[in-house]
Amino acid sequence: MTQEFKATVILIFTTIFAGLGWIFSKQAIAELPPFAFIGTRFVIASLLLVPFCYKSLSALSRQQVINAASVGVIMSGALLTWVTAISVTDTLAEGAFISSLAMLFAPFVGWLLFKQRPIRMFWVSLPFAVLGLGFLSLSNGYHHSPSQIWFLISAILLAFHFNFNAKYAQTIPSLALACIQLMVVGVVASIASLLLEQWPETISSTTWMWLGLSTIVATSLRYVMQTVGQKLTTSGNAAIIMILEPVWASSLSVVFYGDDMPIGKVIGCGLILWSLFVYRGGAKLLERRLQKSSL
């Protein structure tokens, strides 16, 4: 088994776990307050990562801790808006594809913050994404769903997180960076829950099960597997495989909840998926051609 094949298998399972995370989250917040769910989930997930990175954590400078925590604050905003969208959405499939647009928003944010001009394939793929969003919004006539807006805000915040996370990942070990971010998200969400939410008097064992699966499988295990997979392959290959996340999420939502997917929404999701593939796959193909031409 080659290293590339191992990476592919690991990352495919990572996307499956990520897709399952949408279902676990939707099931858990049927009884748990959304912010309380995020707070509990991410504090526990952070603690589960500590044994794998405690040496790296103890070696961090004060500035590195501050940098990692600041990225965690951005991640908090993205996840709190995401779970708000999850709590009010009628279809997870639509939300999964809107959230995946963070990958296309990221170059805009990088251009704005760090003067990094987007690659050519970004401009080629962008019209497909815009058209896909249009199909999602207009498939049942003109309307604006609150969940669509929340998912879109979450995707924009995730694009900011992606850029700052990539910047600080150059100087901070990946698991230590993740551990701090997860803890910050958990603390911020817990504070928001204490201020804005009221816990139910009783919580069923089934809901605790969904919370446990979401924490262990969709957060801690998923991130560790993603980190391992990314170390075994190039970032371009990893990014293309990670495009599968919204595909799994939408497929599982149809199976679990019988989500309504009229032809307009199917076309919209397909266009968004195609735009992501063009952006990542096209960039990789262009890079290969340039390498061949330089030989």
Image (tube, rainbow, N blue to C red):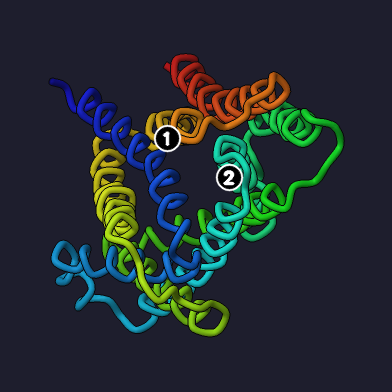
Q: Quadrant of the N terminus?
A: top left
Image quarter of residue 174: bottom left
Mark closer to the chain start, 2 or 1: 2
Specify whether 105 is left or right of 25: right
Q: Which residue is mark 2?
A: 99
Is 173 rendered above or below residue 36? above
Dot 1 falls on a residue whose secondary structure is helix
Dot 2 falls on a residue whose secondary structure is helix
Q: Which residue is mark 1?
A: 242
Amino acid residing under circle 2:
Ser
Residue at point 23% right, 73% down? Answer: 57
Amino acid residing under circle 1:
Met
Q: Position of residue 87 (x, y in %)?
A: 56, 55
Q: Position of residue 45 (x, y in %)?
A: 28, 63
Q: Position of residue 140 (x, y in %)?
A: 79, 30
Residue at point 36% right, 77% down? Answer: 65
Specify whether 39 is left or right of 135: left
Residue at point 81% right, 32% down? Answer: 138
